[in-house]
Image (tube, grey):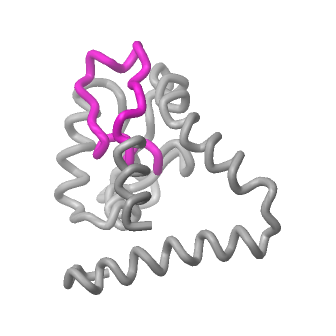
Amino acid sequence: MILLMPRLMARSKRMPIPEELKDFALTPRHLSLLALLVYDEEATVKELAAGLQVASTTVSLVVGDLSRQGILERREDEADRRRTIVTIAVEHRAAVESWLAAGADSWHTVLQPLTPEERGVVVGALLAYERESMAATGQPD
């Protein structure tokens, strides 16, 4: 596992950016945020920060950058105007989804033949590894 995990992370960071997105200078940190928005379709900055386990100010900076480039759209939450709802701009959604598809398809291929219980063991082991590695380095949850 010690040899495998860095290889997996390195491969995910080398996923080729679709041609339509190459001019935007996207990085792996953008990929994580965009992945959350692909699966949830929209979220608040606070929800994105919680999902990424980073400060809301960090997410606000990334969202601001991607919004200025037109990749993300922001709008006020009608129920609470203090909250901002973030979503991927319609014109870039397909390109972002194609960027993420290889990783998602690979996980589907690997996990599909497993029983629900076996999938639970895999996910549980990865979550336990995350918790233990954070505890070993003194990082907060």
* Residue 111 left/right relative to 70: right
Q: Nearer the viewer, residue 37 or 7?
A: 7
Which quadrant, please, contains the C terminus?
Answer: bottom left
Q: Is 87 included in the stretch rendered in magenta? A: no
Q: Is the magenta stretch mostly helix, strand or loop?
A: helix
- Residue placed furthest toward the front: 3
Q: Which residue is at 40% across, 63% downward? A: 51
Q: Is 22 included in the stretch rendered in magenta? A: yes
Q: In which quarter of the image is residue 44?
A: bottom left
Q: What stretch is highlighted in magenta?
A: 13-36
Q: In which quarter of the image is residue 17?
A: top left
Q: Nearer the viewer, residue 124 or 40?
A: 124
Which quadrant, please, contains the N terminus?
Answer: bottom left
Considering only vertical position in the picture, is 43 above or below 69? below
Considering only vertical position in the picture, is 43 above or below 114? above
* Residue 92 left/right relative to 98: left
Considering only vertical position in the picture, is 140 above or below 40? below
Considering only vertical position in the picture, is 116 above or below 34? below
Q: Which residue is at 32% across, 78% downward? A: 133
Q: Position of residue 114 (x, y in %)?
A: 78, 62
Q: Which residue is at 62% across, 70% downward? A: 122
